Structure formats: structure tokens, C-alpha cells
Image (cartoon, rainbow, N blue to C red):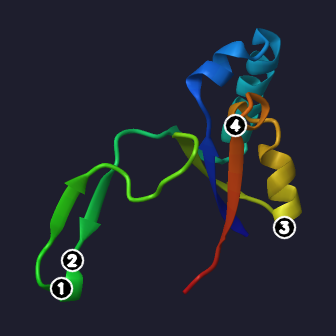
Amino acid sequence: MKFVTIGYGERSDYDRTDPAVRDAAHAHDDRLRAAGAEMGIAGAPVQVRNPGGAGVAVAEGAFLRSDLPVAGFAIIEAESVEEAVRMVSGTPCAVAHGVVEVWPLTQG
């Protein structure tokens, strides 16, 4: 199964995390990438709308709202949601006082 993961976290929380913990988390991300995960840091988003196919409207900024800023995304493959949770539990957002959401992707 494929999963989309969304990491949220404040830079100040990351900065106050022990450097050894942060280094281990980045090494963990490197291992996930080496195993095939697609990962990236979130840039500035835009919203796209095309109601009824009548014309595209683009607006700067996120539609999604969160208590913490979005830090990054990944697409991972795992046998189950439990395995996906295990895979992301050592990532920087998870260990640096942030949160990681795990969303299963289903074919529509």
C-alpha cells in the first residue's frame, strides 16, 4: 500500500530538540529515501479551483489550516498502516515536538 505522510512542526521546536536526536532523525529519513520513499520539504502552496470546468482560478496560500505549519510530505510504501506509523515515527517532525499524519492512498 502507498501512504501520504504530512509532517507538521515549528522551527523553534526543532531547534530546541537535542542535536543528536535531530541527527538520528535525519539519518532515519535518509534510510527511508534509500528504501524508495519520496520526501520533500513543503514550499509555498497555491490553491487551484476550476468550478464546473468554467475556468481556472489560482490563489496563493494554503487552504488547509493547522495549529502547526506544514513542514514536509512523503509518499511511502508499507504493508499496513501500523508499518507506515513505525516507518515515520523516527522522522524529524515526529521527534522534534511536531506531528506526522499518515494517510492511506486508495485507488479511485
Question: Which residue carries the number 1 mark?
Answer: 53
Label 2 amino acid? Asn
Between 108 and 54, which is closer to the camera in this rendering?
A: 54
Q: Residue at x 69, y 54 (%)?
A: 101
Q: Nearer the viewer, mark 4 or mark 3?
A: 4
Q: How many marks?
A: 4
Tag of residue 100: none
Residue 90 location, x and y as percent?
Answer: 81, 36
Label 1 amino acid? Gly
Q: Residue at x 54, y 50 (%)?
A: 66
Q: Earlier in the sequence, mark 2 or mark 3?
A: 2
User: Callout 3: few (<14), some (14-19), or many (20+) C-alpha neighbours within 10 Å?
Assistant: few
Q: Residue at x 37, y 52 (%)?
A: 62
User: In terms of secondary structure, where does tag 4 sit?
Assistant: loop
User: Callout 2: few (<14), some (14-19), or many (20+) C-alpha neighbours within 10 Å?
Assistant: few
Residue 87 location, x and y as percent?
Answer: 81, 47
Q: Earlier in the sequence, mark 4 or mark 1?
A: 1
User: In terms of secondary structure, where does tag 3 sit?
Assistant: loop
Question: Which residue carries the number 3 mark?
Answer: 80
Question: Which residue carries the number 4 mark?
Answer: 98
